[in-house]
Image (tube, rainbow, N blue to C red):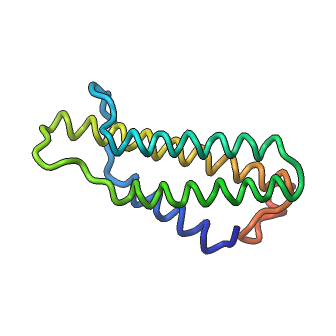
Amino acid sequence: MNKQTIHRMIATFAVCSVGFISAPAMAGPDFFQQQMIQRVMQAKQKLQQAEAAKGAERQKLMDEHMKMLHETMGKCAAMKPKAGMSAQERDEWYSEHQKLMNQMMEQMMEEHRMMMDMGNMPMDMGDMHKH
Protein backbone atom coordinates (compact mmCIF):
# COMPACT_ATOMS: atom_id res chain seq x y z
CA MET A 1 0.00 0.00 0.00
CA ASN A 2 1.63 3.22 -1.03
CA LYS A 3 1.64 6.48 0.88
CA GLN A 4 -0.51 8.31 -1.67
CA THR A 5 -3.33 5.74 -1.47
CA ILE A 6 -3.44 5.89 2.32
CA HIS A 7 -3.45 9.70 2.29
CA ARG A 8 -6.25 9.68 -0.29
CA MET A 9 -8.35 7.31 1.83
CA ILE A 10 -7.84 9.36 4.98
CA ALA A 11 -8.75 12.54 3.10
CA THR A 12 -11.88 10.89 1.70
CA PHE A 13 -12.89 9.76 5.15
CA ALA A 14 -12.35 13.24 6.59
CA VAL A 15 -14.42 14.87 3.84
CA CYS A 16 -17.24 12.37 4.35
CA SER A 17 -17.21 12.87 8.11
CA VAL A 18 -17.19 16.66 8.22
CA GLY A 19 -20.42 18.16 9.36
CA PHE A 20 -22.23 15.00 10.35
CA ILE A 21 -24.25 15.30 13.47
CA SER A 22 -24.93 12.66 16.06
CA ALA A 23 -28.61 11.96 16.17
CA PRO A 24 -30.32 8.85 17.39
CA ALA A 25 -31.45 6.77 14.45
CA MET A 26 -35.19 6.29 14.36
CA ALA A 27 -35.44 4.75 10.93
CA GLY A 28 -33.24 2.17 9.33
CA PRO A 29 -30.73 2.85 6.61
CA ASP A 30 -31.99 3.56 3.10
CA PHE A 31 -31.38 1.19 0.19
CA PHE A 32 -28.00 2.68 -0.76
CA GLN A 33 -26.83 2.70 2.83
CA GLN A 34 -27.84 -0.95 3.14
CA GLN A 35 -25.66 -1.71 0.13
CA MET A 36 -22.76 0.12 1.75
CA ILE A 37 -23.31 -1.72 5.04
CA GLN A 38 -23.08 -4.99 3.12
CA ARG A 39 -19.84 -3.87 1.45
CA VAL A 40 -18.35 -2.81 4.79
CA MET A 41 -19.25 -6.20 6.25
CA GLN A 42 -17.58 -7.96 3.31
CA ALA A 43 -14.47 -5.85 3.81
CA LYS A 44 -14.45 -6.76 7.49
CA GLN A 45 -14.59 -10.45 6.60
CA LYS A 46 -11.63 -9.93 4.26
CA LEU A 47 -9.70 -8.24 7.07
CA GLN A 48 -10.48 -11.14 9.41
CA GLN A 49 -9.18 -13.55 6.76
CA ALA A 50 -6.01 -11.46 6.48
CA GLU A 51 -5.51 -11.52 10.23
CA ALA A 52 -5.65 -15.32 10.21
CA ALA A 53 -3.27 -15.61 7.23
CA LYS A 54 0.51 -15.43 7.16
CA GLY A 55 3.16 -13.97 4.88
CA ALA A 56 2.36 -13.18 1.26
CA GLU A 57 -1.23 -14.42 1.60
CA ARG A 58 -1.80 -11.99 4.46
CA GLN A 59 -0.42 -9.09 2.45
CA LYS A 60 -2.57 -10.05 -0.56
CA LEU A 61 -5.72 -10.14 1.59
CA MET A 62 -4.82 -6.82 3.23
CA ASP A 63 -4.36 -5.24 -0.20
CA GLU A 64 -7.76 -6.59 -1.27
CA HIS A 65 -9.30 -5.24 1.94
CA MET A 66 -7.83 -1.78 1.38
CA LYS A 67 -9.09 -1.78 -2.21
CA MET A 68 -12.59 -2.73 -1.02
CA LEU A 69 -12.57 0.08 1.56
CA HIS A 70 -11.27 2.58 -0.98
CA GLU A 71 -14.10 1.75 -3.40
CA THR A 72 -16.72 1.84 -0.65
CA MET A 73 -15.45 5.18 0.65
CA GLY A 74 -15.71 6.64 -2.83
CA LYS A 75 -19.30 5.51 -3.09
CA CYS A 76 -20.09 6.81 0.41
CA ALA A 77 -18.56 10.18 -0.44
CA ALA A 78 -20.94 10.45 -3.40
CA MET A 79 -24.03 9.58 -1.34
CA LYS A 80 -26.44 12.36 -0.46
CA PRO A 81 -29.74 12.35 1.44
CA LYS A 82 -32.82 12.31 -0.78
CA ALA A 83 -34.43 15.62 -1.61
CA GLY A 84 -37.57 16.42 0.33
CA MET A 85 -36.57 14.70 3.57
CA SER A 86 -37.76 16.19 6.79
CA ALA A 87 -35.13 17.48 9.22
CA GLN A 88 -35.55 14.36 11.36
CA GLU A 89 -35.22 12.01 8.35
CA ARG A 90 -32.11 13.88 7.21
CA ASP A 91 -30.63 13.66 10.73
CA GLU A 92 -31.33 9.92 10.77
CA TRP A 93 -29.76 9.53 7.32
CA TYR A 94 -26.62 11.35 8.48
CA SER A 95 -26.50 9.23 11.63
CA GLU A 96 -26.54 6.04 9.54
CA HIS A 97 -23.94 7.49 7.20
CA GLN A 98 -21.70 8.37 10.14
CA LYS A 99 -21.99 4.81 11.47
CA LEU A 100 -20.77 3.52 8.12
CA MET A 101 -17.85 5.92 8.11
CA ASN A 102 -16.92 4.93 11.68
CA GLN A 103 -16.95 1.25 10.77
CA MET A 104 -14.62 1.90 7.84
CA MET A 105 -12.30 3.96 10.02
CA GLU A 106 -12.18 1.16 12.60
CA GLN A 107 -11.19 -1.27 9.85
CA MET A 108 -8.50 1.07 8.57
CA MET A 109 -7.11 1.40 12.08
CA GLU A 110 -7.11 -2.38 12.51
CA GLU A 111 -5.30 -2.83 9.21
CA HIS A 112 -2.82 -0.16 10.28
CA ARG A 113 -2.18 -2.12 13.49
CA MET A 114 -1.67 -5.31 11.51
CA MET A 115 0.80 -3.59 9.21
CA MET A 116 2.74 -2.29 12.18
CA ASP A 117 2.83 -5.79 13.67
CA MET A 118 4.22 -7.09 10.38
CA GLY A 119 6.90 -4.38 10.35
CA ASN A 120 5.51 -3.25 7.00
CA MET A 121 4.37 0.25 7.86
CA PRO A 122 4.04 2.73 4.98
CA MET A 123 4.86 6.42 5.14
CA ASP A 124 8.24 5.74 6.77
CA MET A 125 6.52 4.98 10.08
CA GLY A 126 7.78 1.43 10.53
CA ASP A 127 9.82 2.23 13.63
CA MET A 128 7.31 4.49 15.39
CA HIS A 129 5.67 1.64 17.30
CA LYS A 130 9.04 0.47 18.70
CA HIS A 131 9.83 3.62 20.69
Between residue 115 and residue 29, name the one nearer to us. Answer: 29
- Please give the name of the residue rendered at 79% of the width and 58% of the height, measured from the top-left corner: 59
Number of residue marks: 0
Percent x, y for residue 8? 53, 69
Look at 78% across and 55% down and name the residue there. Answer: 115
Q: Say whether residue 95 is left or right of residue 113.
A: left
Give the quadrant of the N terminus: bottom right
Residue 14 location (% of width, % of height): 45, 58
Q: Quadrant of residue 69?
A: bottom right
Whether residue 77 is visible, yes or no, is yes
86 on left or right of 129? left
Residue at the right extreme of this rendering: 55
Quarter of the picture containing the C terminus is bottom right
- Left/right placement of residue 103 relative to residue 34 reads right
Residue 16, placed above or below residue 44: below
Estimate the x, y position of residue 80 in percent, counting from the top left: 27, 53
Q: Is residue 86 left or right of residue 99?
A: left
Q: Residue furthest top?
A: 26
Instruction: Report which quarter residue 47 is drawn in.
Output: top right
- In the rendering, at what x and y percent does residue 65 appear? 65, 53
Q: Quadrant of residue 66?
A: bottom right
Q: Residue at x 74, y 49 (%)?
A: 113
Whether residue 131 can be seen here: no
